[in-house]
Amino acid sequence: MKKAENIIVGISIGDLNGIGSEVVLKTFEDTRMLELCTPVIFANVKTLSFLKKSFESTAMLHGIDRLDQLVIGKINVLNIWREGFTLEYGVNDPIVGQHAIKSFVAATNALKDGLVDVLVTAPINKYNVQSEEFKFPGHTDYLNQELKGNALMLMVQDNLRVGLLTDHIAVNEVASHLTEELIRQKIETIKQTLIQDFSINKPKIAVLGLNPHAGDGGVIGKEDDAIIKPVIKKMFEKGTMVFGPYPADGFFGSGQYEKFDAVIATYHDQGLIPFKTLSFGNGVNYTAGLDKIRTSPDHGTAYDIAGKGIADFNSFKEAVYLAIDIYNSRNLYKEISERPLKIKEKHLESKKG
């Protein structure tokens, strides 16, 4: 297993007119972070050196042109572009959006190639990144295309974990997307994630209902009884500790979520409104279900405070912590899973001898 400081954290810089560069650099001003990992920011060292003056960052940057030049214990900045361009905090600029995607795509390729161990993404503007080459509503959809597995948005803050059956789709389309196959797949993904990424051997999972009062026995919508409940029943009978569907309105306010290792919401706002209310800016967005690890803070570009030096970097720092923790958990899980095979191989070798 790698030493802590040798875990390479790839960082896509996000929208440079937002707070991304501020939260990234402020996270690594604390030199103790460099004892936990070695960051590589996919951007341009001159651009970041210019920006850091505006929020008085003391981060010491080390520019490199190739990943084999990175220095352990330094804040490495891999030069992804050379050209200069105008930056103006708080402005929605397609050129800035193009550079955010250059950073993200390069960082994703490095993750795929094993040149970085984990990926942490700073916020992008979902509108100014659109182009002929990039037609995705966000990071998650692109990663789902490029990496192996089935991506699932899992919001994490300590023991509070909220996953989504559907994410970036319109509310009036949610019901039509709920199928037995989708629900089963998402439950299985969360179960495996809790086991291998969070070291929870027998996870308990709650599923929220789609309709008010989880349909109230079919009086307020049929989906909960007709689609969601039968899947939960089948999976429970086969050994998965999954329960529900629970009425969503009182589930979090009553503290019921504390009895479970993860909660699955049926649509975006049903899960993210209570999560962000409870997480107080320390939440992390984890893309579960993929063969590689990606986390991000739970906030956006925050144009209104960009460049003022007042952005809270806790969520980004927690995203780095979580990525490292999951990396270590996966390695431990892999080691334990392979141990019986290695014992069997040694036994066969000894018999041959």
Image (spheres, rainbow, N blue to C red):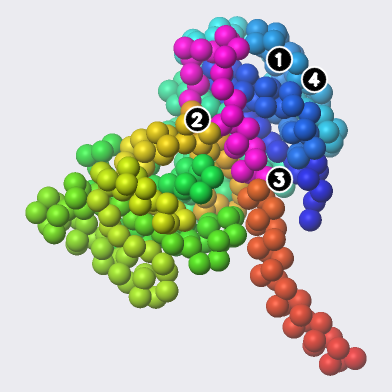
| Precedes in sequence: disc 3 or disc 2 | 3
Q: SS of the residue at dot 3?
A: loop
Q: Are marks 1 and 3 in contact (CB under 8 Å)?
A: no
Q: CA distance from mark 4 to mark 3?
A: 22 Å
| Precedes in sequence: disc 1 or disc 2 | 1
Q: CA distance from mark 1 to mark 2?
A: 21 Å
Q: SS of the residue at dot 2?
A: loop
Q: CA distance from mark 3 to mark 2?
A: 25 Å
Q: CA distance from mark 1 to mark 3?
A: 26 Å
Amino acid on which the number 4 mark rests in the picture = Met
Residue 57, label in figure? 1
Nearer to us in this view, 318 or 24: 318
Q: Would you say 150 lies left or right of 319 here?
A: left
Which residue bears the numbered disc 4? 60
Seen at 74% across and 23% down, the residue is 29
Q: Residue 116 magenta-drawn?
A: no
Nearer to us in this view, 80 or 170: 170
Nearer to us in this view, 133 or 142: 142
Residue at the farthest front position: 254
Q: Is residue 19 above or below residue 224?
A: above
Q: Are marks 2 and 4 in contact (CB under 8 Å)?
A: no
* The N terminus lies in quadrant: bottom right
